[in-house]
């Protein structure tokens, strides 16, 4: 309850800052009123075109996150078991984690064109986060827990199901939470620059070009809420498995 109250207080404080800022600026072309933004926000859900835009961007985001999560998870698992693969992949992961997003965007545009770029750039920005979390999770598992499964079963898939996967669940969930916000930002930026049709990025561009800044704020609020909803879903339901009986005994000891 206290946490919810603090959250509401924080949002209310931000609203007050917005109202005061508008009172100072007094220009809708620079900073629209909260009321106009609220009307623009609800209008997004009454237009079939806007709903199509929202669903299209959401689909791109989910497909990109799913592909990055699957590839990052599998390669992270294999790299955790095979140090040579980890060494081989390290330069690529380092490059993707450090290269500016705009550089990746330009390269993707040249190589793959405008239509595919939003998917690829989102994938490339999320992949290293997932990969690194899975790899580090595998490498930091207590060797005693692995020994238990080797002594009792000595089967790789048993250890993977009941030991490795459950114990990397927490770092992987953290990586997914980071990927949600990053994915939204990167995807919409790519849609904006690539002028992807039927996308929130393109809707933002058109609103800016037409000086409809209440629409710009409305789309921005929607993106924030979209990222929050995805993070809440991940926090509550992203559980890969449960720790086996033996691992629980060891951890309790």
Image (spheres, grey):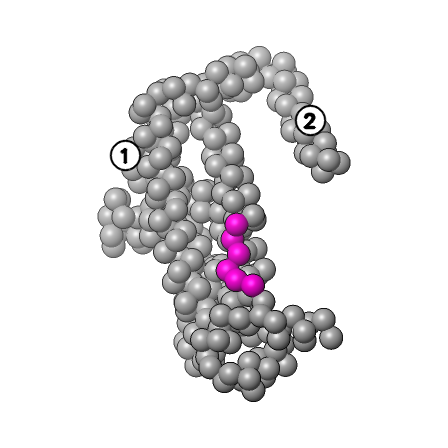
Residue 187 lies left or right of residue 174; in this view the side is left
Give the overall secondary structure of the magenta segment: loop
Instruction: State yes or no: residue 68 in magenta.
Output: no
**Residue at position x 51%, y 83% in the image:** 153
Residue shown at the point (27%, 34%) measured from the top left: 197
Q: Where is residue 99 in the image (x, y as percent from the top left)?
A: 44, 57
Q: How many neighbours does mark 2 have within 10 angstroms: few (below 14), some (14-19), or many (20 or more)?
A: few
Q: Can residue 66 be seen in this view?
A: yes
- 89 lies above or below 83: above
Residue at 42% x, 18% y: name it.
Answer: 43
**113 is higher (above) or lower (below) than 139:** above
Q: Quadrant of residue 242?
A: bottom right
- Which of the two labelled residues, at mark 2 and mark 1, occupies the earlier sequence position? 2
Q: Quadrant of the C terminus?
A: bottom right
The extreme bottom residue here reads: 151
Picture disc at residue 13: 2
Which residue carries the number 1 mark? 197
The quarter of the displayed image where residue 213 is located: top left
Residue 186 pos. (x, y %) = 43, 45
* Relative to 96, residue 144 above or below: below
Residue stretch in magenta: 237-242
Element type where label 2 sits in the image: helix
Q: Secondary structure beneath disc 1?
A: loop
Within 10 Å of the Cα at label 1, are there few (<14), some (14-19), or many (20+) other Cα atoms? some
Which residue is pictured at 25% across the width and 44% down the height?
A: 115
State the CA–CA distance, disc 2 to disc 1.
36 Å
| Residue 238 covered by magenta stretch | yes
Any part of residue 202 in sight: no
Task: Find residue 199 and report its horizontal and vertical position in percent.
Answer: 33, 34
Evaluate if marks 2 and 1 touch, with contact meaning CB atoms under 8 Å apart.
no
């Amino acid at each position: 309850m206290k946490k919810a109250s603090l959250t509401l207080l924080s949002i209310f404080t931000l609203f007050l800052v917005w109202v005061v800022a508008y009172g100072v600026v007094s220009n809708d072309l620079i900073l629209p009123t909260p009321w106009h933004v609220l009307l623009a926000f609800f209008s997004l859900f009454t237009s079939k075109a806007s709903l199509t835009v929202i669903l299209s961007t959401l689909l791109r985001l989910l497909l990109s996150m799913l592909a990055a999560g699957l590839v990052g998870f599998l390669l992270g698992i294999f790299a955790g078991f095979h140090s040579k693969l980890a060494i081989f992949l390290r330069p690529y992961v380092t490059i993707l984690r450090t290269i500016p997003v705009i550089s990746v965007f330009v390269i993707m545009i040249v190589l793959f064109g405008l239509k595919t770029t939003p998917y690829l750039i989102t994938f490339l920005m999320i992949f290293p986060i997932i990969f690194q979390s899975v790899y580090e999770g595998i490498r930091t598992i207590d060797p005693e827990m692995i020994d238990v499964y080797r002594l009792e079963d000595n089967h790789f898939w048993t250890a993977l199901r009941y030991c490795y996967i459950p114990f990397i669940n927490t770092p992987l969930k953290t990586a997914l939470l980071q990927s949600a916000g990053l994915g939204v930002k990167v995807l919409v930026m790519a849609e904006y620059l690539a002028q992807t049709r039927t996308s929130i990025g393109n809707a933002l561009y058109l609103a800016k070009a037409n000086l409809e800044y209440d629409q710009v704020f409305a789309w921005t609020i929607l993106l924030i809420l979209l990222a929050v909803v995805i993070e809440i879903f991940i926090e509550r339901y992203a559980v890969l498995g449960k720790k086996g009986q033996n691992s629980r005994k060891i951890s309790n000891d």
